[in-house]
Image (cartoon, rainbow, N blue to C red):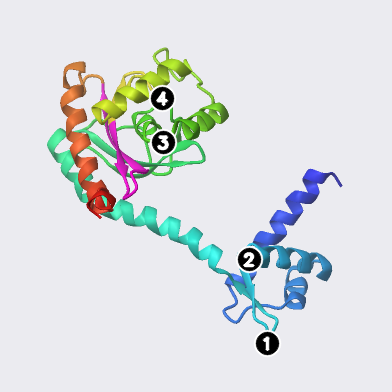
Amino acid sequence: MRESDTSSVAVERALAIMESIAHRAAGLTNAEIARKLTIPKSSASYILKTLERTGYLRRERGTGKYLLGLKLLSLTRAVDVASDLRELARPTMRALVESTQLTAHLAILDRGEAVYIEKVDTPGFIKMDTWIGRRMDVHSTSVGKALLAMLSEAETDAILAERGLNPRTPKTITDASKLMAEFKRIRSLGFAVDDEENSQGVRCVAAAILDAFGRPRAALGLSGTTAQIGRGSVARLGAIVRVAAREISVQIGYGSQVRG
């Protein structure tokens, strides 16, 4: 068996072990896990010890049974935070849609991509071809650029080096130096613009939502066709979304470190 195949089997077994333990409130012993999953007891023992050492599982001394560890709680907390942010942002998004007649999106940065976690559609006939869970390039979207602009240069460089600067349309910025200049402009204005850079005929504006430490937690954006968002209205809409994003930022603690 190749090394990659062996690694894949180990990962699958580790996930299966955690799922089995999650479904047994009282926990499971090494022997019970090996029997339940029909894997060698020695293999189960190795995986269990690794998961225990890294905090994903904990072992009761008296019974020898394994239970879920605190490390998993921190991961589920990250999901809870995203859910909380959606709930917090939804009223603001609805107000934006009502006042602008444009589609509102809420996106987070995940593994170097912008991911929509909430969307509020415009009540009109024109609908954006987007959905919750959609993953997009960060260099060609307004939400992606708004997020990247607020990261450190080292973090931004690492993401762009990994993801690349693929041209989505003829207007996509594919030169790193030009994109860095764009980030500087975004920080100055407080909002980012996607001028048909991700999809032809679509224009978007977005602003970052910052936490108590000034880190980008999400980006709030407005999207529409080029007919709905003319170039003359970009600055006005950018200012609107910037104010809305700041209001949400304050609600999650932005500025509290300064007020301290």
Q: Earlier in the sequence, mark 2 or mark 1?
A: 2
Which residue lies most toward the top here?
170
Estimate how packed mark 3 is, as few (under 14), some (14 to 19) or many (20 or more) residues with alpha carbons within 10 Å: some
**Three-letter amino acid code of the residue under disc 4:** Ser
Q: Earlier in the sequence, mark 4 or mark 1?
A: 1
Secondary element type, mark 3? loop
Q: CA distance from mark 2 to mark 1?
A: 20 Å
Of residues 238 and 118, the one drawn nearer to the viewer in this rendering? 238
Q: Which residue is mark 2?
A: 18
Q: Residue at x 82, y 71 (%)?
A: 41
Q: Residue at x 57, y 69 (%)?
A: 69
Of residues 216 and 80, the one drawn nearer to the viewer in this rendering? 216
Q: Which residue is mark 1?
A: 62
**Three-letter amino acid code of the residue under disc 1:** Gly
State yes or no: discs 2 and 1 in contact (Cβ < 8 Å): no
Q: CA distance from mark 4 to mark 1?
A: 56 Å
Residue 150: x percent and y percent?
A: 37, 35
Q: Residue 140: which disc? A: 4
Residue 56: x percent and y percent?
A: 60, 64
Using the rendered image of the protein, determine whether residue 49 is visible from the camera's viewpoint. yes
Using the rendered image of the protein, determine whether residue 172 is visible from the camera's viewpoint. no
Look at discs 1 and 3 and give the one toward the viewer. 3
- Magenta stretch? 206-225
- Horizontal side of 92 relative to 177 (left or right) equals left
Residue 20: x percent and y percent?
A: 64, 70
Count how many numbered circles sit on residues in the image: 4
**Three-letter amino acid code of the residue under disc 2:** Met
Look at discs 2 and 3 and give the one toward the viewer. 3
